[in-house]
């Protein structure tokens, strides 16, 4: 029997693995690296994570007497080769939700069944699959809050499934993991990632344990403070690669609330963020081009600008707005960015700079270790105003007041923009407002040590609102 691992790189609470192991037959644990079949190939940071996650999974499987078989190429062809080599009579996998991947799986399933090979698929990635929850009129939810209410009221997690006790089975031919080409080389820009992350199932459960040990209780307030290192769970990349499942998170949080170990306010707020991920998969399932096309087609009329210099300044964290630059530098150095800051930098790109949300979504896809095919584009479209249940486009975040409110003591900006560290708090988020004496004391020469703003807040806000008026007039006349 073959268990085909994809975005479910864990042994516990893995329905496909549990079902296969329950048959009591020898198992082949298979991972196929098939870039050609992906809707979009993984970005660099995600490839780094996948490399470490596969390494961890392989070791976990070996401890149970098994072996992780790695193949590169067409998924159907690789499966056929492993079936021929091992005589496997059944294949088990967990479902995927992007259109091209669903089509691939459906084709493979049909062809295998024609040959008498049994195929079973399961849900391991979501609490509730995208077609399950319906509105009163029978459609799918397009607004998050009623979706969350329906999910919270109806969801009951399935019983937990422990990891199999043994994974012994044949060892078909496997390529060396290095041949997958996942780890960056020449240059290896990932060295700063290693001390920060522990990809793999054990690392995922440690993250959850640490978060529930205390930080979850202050989550409703401190989740918006980027200077608080433990203000969020840090589980997003682990969920992205299926090293922990959302049902496992749900069970753990509910159990901790029922035992009085964590506050209900913190627990439910955290679970609502898990639900946003679920909602994003509903959107991806029903709008498969969500990463490339406006969910709200009114935004097809938006007069986006093209400005390579401004885009590069944003990517490098050199816009002259400290909270924006701190976020972009954190992203480059760690493969992750605080969620509040993600909204700030996305608003700045799409509104102050009037650059298309796809530019930002593509950059995040390449640089985030948690770049998720549903959450990444859904969140970008939400901020840009073009998405489902989106923030109004005329809501333009002020990066100065956002910094002052959520990084009041300046710890976040001072960490990622150390050239500004000696500025007083009241000027830290608007260094251009400091007079010559203060700048000299802080050791800053604007335009040299730290850039002048690429655009003023006032000009950027006016540009965004003017563009929105243009969109409305073209929509109404069209």
Image (cartoon, grey):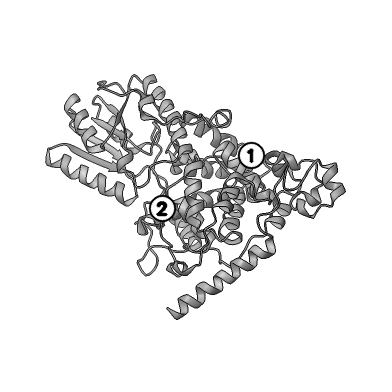
Look at the picture and state if 113 lies above or below 401: above
Query: Within 10 angstroms of label 2, few (less than 14), some, or many (20 or more) residues?
Result: many
Give SS at disc 1: loop
Q: What's the distance in space between the residues labelled 2 and 1, CA to CA?
A: 27 Å
Which residue corresponds to mark 2?
281
* Residue found 42% across the figure and 68% down from its top: 297
Q: Nearer the viewer, residue 414 or 317?
A: 317
Look at the picture and state if 17 lies above or below 273: above
Look at the picture and state if 397 lies above or below 425: below
In primary-sequence order, the first of circles 2 and 1 is 1
Which residue corresponds to mark 1?
230
Q: Quadrant of residue 32?
A: top left
Look at the picture and state if 283 lies above or below 55: below
Query: Within 10 angstroms of label 1, few (less than 14), some, or many (20 or more) residues?
Result: some
Quadrant containing the N terminus in the rendered view: top left
Picture coordinates of residue 238 (x, y %)?
48, 38
């Amino acid at each position: 029997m073959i268990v085909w691992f994809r975005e479910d790189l864990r042994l516990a609470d893995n329905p496909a693995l549990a079902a296969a192991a329950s048959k009591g037959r020898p198992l082949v644990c298979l991972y196929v690296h098939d870039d050609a079949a992906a809707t979009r190939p993984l970005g660099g940071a995600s490839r780094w994570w996948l490399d470490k996650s596969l390494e961890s999974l392989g070791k976990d499987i070996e401890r149970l007497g098994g072996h992780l078989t790695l193949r590169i190429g067409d998924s159907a062809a690789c499966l056929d080769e492993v079936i021929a080599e091992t005589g496997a009579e059944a294949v088990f996998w967990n479902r995927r939700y992007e259109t091209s991947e669903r089509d691939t799986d459906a084709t493979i399933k049909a062809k295998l069944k024609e040959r008498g090979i049994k195929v079973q698929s399961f849900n391991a990635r979501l609490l509730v699959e995208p077609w399950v929850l319906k509105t009163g009129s029978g459609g799918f939810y397009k607004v998050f809050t009623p979706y969350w209410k329906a999910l919270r009221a109806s969801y009951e997690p399935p019983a937990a499934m422990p990891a199999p006790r043994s994974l012994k089975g044949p060892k078909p031919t496997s390529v060396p993991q290095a041949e997958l080409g996942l780890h960056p080389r020449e240059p290896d820009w990932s060295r700063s990632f290693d001390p920060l992350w522990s990809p793999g199932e054990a690392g995922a459960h440690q993250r959850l344990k640490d978060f529930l040990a205390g930080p979850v209780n202050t989550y409703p307030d401190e989740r918006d403070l980027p200077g608080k290192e433990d203000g969020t769970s840090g589980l997003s990349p682990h969920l992205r690669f299926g090293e922990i499942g959302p049902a496992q998170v749900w069970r753990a949080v509910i159990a901790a609330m029922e035992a009085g170990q964590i506050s209900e306010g913190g627990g439910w707020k955290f679970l609502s963020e898990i639900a946003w991920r679920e909602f994003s998969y509903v959107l991806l399932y029903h709008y498969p081009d969500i990463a490339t096309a406006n969910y709200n087609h009114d935004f097809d009329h938006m007069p986006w600008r093209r400005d390579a210099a401004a885009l590069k300044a944003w990517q490098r964290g050199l816009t002259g707005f400290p909270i924006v630059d701190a976020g972009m530098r954190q992203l480059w150095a760690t493969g992750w960015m605080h969620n509040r800051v993600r909204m700030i930098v996305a608003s700045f790109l799409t509104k102050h700079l009037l650059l298309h949300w796809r530019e930002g979504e593509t950059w995040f896809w390449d640089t985030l270790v948690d770049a998720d095919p549903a959450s990444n584009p859904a969140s970008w479209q939400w901020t840009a105003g073009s998405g489902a249940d989106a923030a109004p486009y005329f809501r333009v975040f002020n990066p100065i007041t956002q910094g002052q409110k959520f990084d009041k003591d300046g710890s976040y900006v001072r960490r990622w923009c150390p050239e500004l560290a000696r500025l007083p708090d009241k000027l830290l988020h608007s260094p251009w407002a400091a007079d010559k004496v203060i700048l000299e004391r802080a050791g800053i020469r604007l335009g040299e040590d730290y850039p002048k703003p690429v655009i003023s807040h006032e000009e950027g806000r006016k540009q965004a609102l003017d563009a929105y008026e243009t969109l409305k007039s073209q929509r109404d006349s069209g």
